Amino acid sequence: MKSKSLGRVRRNHARYHKGRDELNIVPMIDMMVILVFFLIFTAVFSKTNILQLNLPATSTSPPVDLPKTLKLEVIIRPDDVVVNDRNSGPLKIFPNTASGLDLDGLSEFIRQVKSQFPQMTDATILPSPATSYDTLVQVMDTVRVYQLPVAPFSKAELFPDIAIADAPT
């Protein structure tokens, strides 16, 4: 008699729990929603800058005769940086320092050039094939703008219209 009641209990237990074997994914979905919000709100959003570059045209026609004005070129070589006038030749050479490029000297000289030619906005950067991308960006930023000493985050424009070409060999 006892075995009959135990069998009945097992059947009732099996009937009661029938269909409850599947995986309950509701708590997992709740955790994923919380995790997504946590990741979105703690993510570091980086600010990217996009520069408009004016690449030289690939025309075979002879260049148009331009008036004798300054055509500023900055040539980046492995050992130095040369500020050049396309019409008259080198203006100043900045040899590399122990820490790398002399960007402070370059910035000061570019500011002097800008004070003499305030209406000019274009410059050409001519990197050598061995120039790293980081070096190119540093020189471009030095030629484009300079940090004002008055405020920590204010900058003044020098030559914002940058063109890039290959350095002469």
Image (spheres, rainbow, N blue to C red):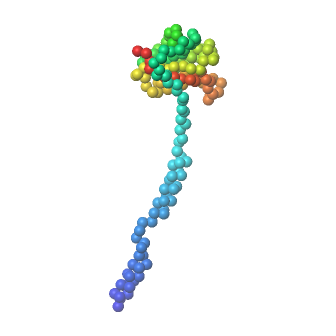
Image position, residue 133 (x, y; %): 45, 27
* Quadrant (top left, top right, bottom left, bottom right) of the C terminus: top left
Against 73, residue 15 (above or below) is below
Q: Position of residue 163 (x, y in %)?
A: 51, 22
Residue at 53 percent across and 51 percent down: it is 38
- Give the residue displayed 46% in from the left and 27% down from the top: 134
At which x and y percent is residue 2? 35, 88
Which residue is most to the bottom? Answer: 1
Residue 140 visible at all: no
- Left or right: residue 116 versus residue 7 is right
Q: How many marks?
A: 0
Instruction: Name the outermost residue toward the front.
Output: 61
Q: Quarter of the image containing the N terminus?
A: bottom left
Name the one closer to the observer, 6 or 49.
49
* In the rendered image, the vertical position of residue 3 relative to residue 46, given as above or below: below
| Residue 118 falls left or right of residue 132 | right
Residue 52: quadrant of the picture: top right
Height in image: 133 above or below 68? Answer: below
Q: On the rendered structure, is 26 left or right of 155?
A: left
- Residue 21 vertical position relative to residue 157 in the rendered view, above or below: below
Residue 32 visible in the current orientation? yes
Residue at 50% from the left image edge and 59% from the top image edge: 30
Extreme-top residue of the structure: 88
At horizontal 48% and vertical 15% (from top left) the residue drawn is 62
Question: Which one is nearer the viewer's eye here, 87 or 154?
Answer: 87
| Nearest the eye: 83 or 167 | 167
- Residue 32 point in image, percent of width and height: 49, 56
